[in-house]
Amino acid sequence: MLHGERFFGVYHRATGNGFAGGVGKIAAVIGPILAGALVGIGYLAALVPLVIAFAAGGIVVLAFGRETKGEPLT
């Protein structure tokens, strides 16, 4: 399991948390508008952006994440 506190200091964790919160608020506004527009095309078209986002997140974790099992928390 990946834990940010093992890799980054307090300043960087706080900045990342704030940035992620801001992006989440933007996505909370744009997501329903985009999904509503795409439902007119079809439900599959409305789900494709979600699938792409989850796949991209998984690829990033697989590419850059490293195993921390057994390492002490510092």
Image (cartoon, rainbow, N blue to C red):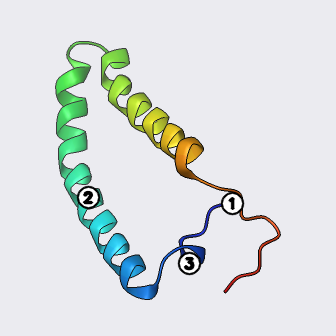
**Residue at image mark 3:** 5
* Quadrant (top left/top right/bottom left/bottom right) for the N terminus: bottom right
Residue at 55%, 42% in the rendered image: 63
Q: Amino acid at mark 2?
A: Val
* Quadrant (top left/top right/bottom left/bottom right) for the C terminus: bottom right
Q: Tell me which label, 3 or 2, sits earlier in the chain.
A: 3
Q: Secondary structure at mark 3?
A: helix
Q: Tell me which label, 2 or 1, sits earlier in the chain.
A: 1
Label 2: few (<14), some or many (≥20) within 10 Å?
Answer: few
Q: Amino acid at mark 1?
A: Met
Residue 23 numbered mark, or none: 2
Q: Secondary structure at mark 1?
A: loop
Q: Position of residue 67 (x, y in %)?
A: 71, 57
Q: Is residue 53 left or right of residue 46?
A: right
**Residue at image mark 1:** 1
Q: Position of residue 45 (x, y in %)?
A: 31, 17
Q: Is residue 18 above or below residue 30?
A: below
Please state which of residues 68 and 40 is positioned toward the viewer in this rendering: 68
Q: Amino acid at mark 3?
A: Glu
Residue 73: image quadrant is: bottom right
Residue at 46%, 43% in the rendered image: 57
